[in-house]
Image (spheres, rainbow, N blue to C red):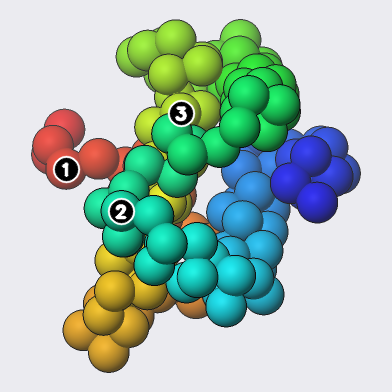
């Protein structure tokens, strides 16, 4: 589902928007299993990728390469600034989403998950420093 989400639209930002939306949908639709997994592991602070077996971890890395390719194209088209390697940007975006999802899982009333994927993309793209 994640691969399909980033391959469908032509625009780089729309691909990332679909990625955020799809990742959230997958998380929410598998919430009981995720809660059980986290309860049986080290809890919400657990690194989701660290507990995965080798084959699943390899699939995560392959997907990150595909996600990084979106940043590569966006940098070449000058839609994105070349501030870090595309792979690092892909990892950072995934980590922001994971952090927000785990925060929401831990305290949904206090930390509601933003319904609009642009909220996460704005955190990622716009940054905190005023120009």
Residue farthest left in this picture? 130
Residue 42 — which label? 2
Q: Residue at x 30, y 53 (%)?
A: 42
Q: Is residue 88 left or right of residue 126?
A: right
Using the numbered discs, state the Cα–Cα distance from disc 1 to disc 3 in whole angstroms.
19 Å
Q: Earlier in the sequence, mark 1 or mark 2?
A: 2
Residue 62, relative to residue 98: is it above or below? above
Q: Position of residue 68 (x, y in %)?
A: 60, 21
Using the numbered discs, state the Cα–Cα distance from disc 1 to disc 2 in whole angstroms.
32 Å
Using the numbered discs, state the Cα–Cα distance from disc 3 to disc 2 in whole angstroms.
22 Å
Q: Position of residue 121 (x, y in %)?
A: 44, 49
Residue farthest bottom in this picture? 109
Q: Residue at x 66, y 63 (%)?
A: 26
Residue 6 — which label? none
Of 127 and 89, which appears nearest the observer?
89
Residue 97, relative to residue 70: is it above or below? below
The quadrant in which residue 32 appears is bottom right
**Residue hosting label 1:** 128
**Residue hosting label 3:** 91
Q: Looking at the image, is mark 1 or mark 2 nearer the viewer?
A: 2
């Amino acid at each position: 589902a994640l691969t399909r989400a980033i391959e469908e639209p032509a625009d780089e930002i729309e691909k990332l928007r679909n990625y955020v939306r799809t990742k959230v949908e997958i998380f929410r639709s598998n919430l009981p299993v995720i809660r059980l997994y986290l309860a049986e592991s080290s809890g919400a602070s657990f690194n989701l990728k660290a507990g995965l077996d080798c084959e699943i971890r390899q699939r995560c890395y392959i997907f990150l390469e595909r996600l990084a390719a979106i940043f590569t194209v966006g940098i070449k088209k000058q839609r994105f600034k070349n501030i870090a390697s595309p792979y690092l940007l892909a990892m950072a975006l995934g980590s922001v989403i994971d952090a927000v999802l785990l925060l929401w899982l831990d305290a949904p009333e206090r930390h509601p998950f933003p319904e609009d994927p642009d909220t996460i993309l704005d955190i990622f793209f716009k940054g905190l420093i005023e120009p």
